[in-house]
């Protein structure tokens, strides 16, 4: 019997990490996954992964294909069903874990909240604009100083 033993408390990552076994049961759900989705560890462990994709067959197809066909997916957008019934868009990578004989034993589903990424991007854009404004202010000040001291 193939079994992956991994304590999700020891699995630190800023991204949500979920390991789903060949029977489609969630065997690992790390702290970031709990923070992003709002689910508690006891609500998740050993449950069928489908409840994370409630009402959305197209969003779970990547995990289904990884489990059945051994396909990997990178930077796909899927919608997760959160504990408070909201639907959350996440960026995800899905990779099958295989034994040396190519037998698929589980899938690693790593995801990041797309809203967090948008907020980070907006924050970065604001900082860039502040730097440009500072540079422009310095150029104006420098030009004024040159005029004053060159007379």
Image (tube, rainbow, N blue to C red):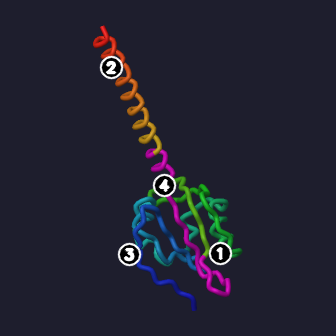
Residue 55 location, quadrant: bottom right
**Farthest-out residue, left:** 149
Residue 97 location, quadrant: bottom right
In the image: residue 129, left or right of residue 110: left
Q: Which residue is mark 3?
A: 10
Q: Secondary structure at mark 4?
A: strand
Q: Earlier in the sequence, mark 3 or mark 1?
A: 3
Q: Residue 112 lies in magenta, yes or no? A: yes
Q: Residue at x 69, y 75 (%)?
A: 68
Residue 96 lies, with reference to residue 151, above or below; the image says below
Q: Earlier in the sequence, mark 2 or mark 3?
A: 3
Tell me, for residue 113, which label it has, or none.
4
Q: Say few, some or many: other residues with alpha carbon within 10 Å of mark 1 (under 14 / 14 to 19 / 20 or more).
A: many
Tell me, for residue 16, which label it has, or none.
none
- Contact? badges 1 and 4 (CB < 8 Å): no
* Alpha carbon separation for disc pair 2 and 4: 42 Å
Q: Residue at x 49, y 78 (%)?
A: 27
Q: Earlier in the sequence, mark 2 or mark 4?
A: 4
């Amino acid at each position: 019997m193939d079994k992956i033993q991994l304590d999700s408390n020891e699995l630190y990552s800023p991204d949500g990490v979920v390991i789903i076994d060949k029977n489609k049961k969630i065997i690992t759900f790390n702290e970031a996954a709990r923070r992003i989705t709002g689910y508690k560890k006891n609500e998740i462990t050993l449950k069928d992964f489908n409840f994370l994709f409630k009402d959305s067959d197209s969003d779970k197809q990547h995990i289904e294909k990884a489990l059945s066909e051994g396909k990997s997916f990178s930077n796909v957008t899927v919608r997760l069903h959160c504990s408070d019934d909201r639907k959350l868009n996440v960026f995800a990578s899905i990779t099958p874990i295989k034994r040396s004989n190519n037998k698929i034993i589980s899938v690693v589903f790593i995801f990041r909240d797309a809203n967090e990424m948008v907020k980070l991007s907006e924050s970065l854009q604001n900082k860039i604009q502040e730097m440009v404004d500072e540079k422009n202010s310095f150029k104006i000040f420098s030009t004024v100083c040159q005029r004053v001291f060159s007379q």
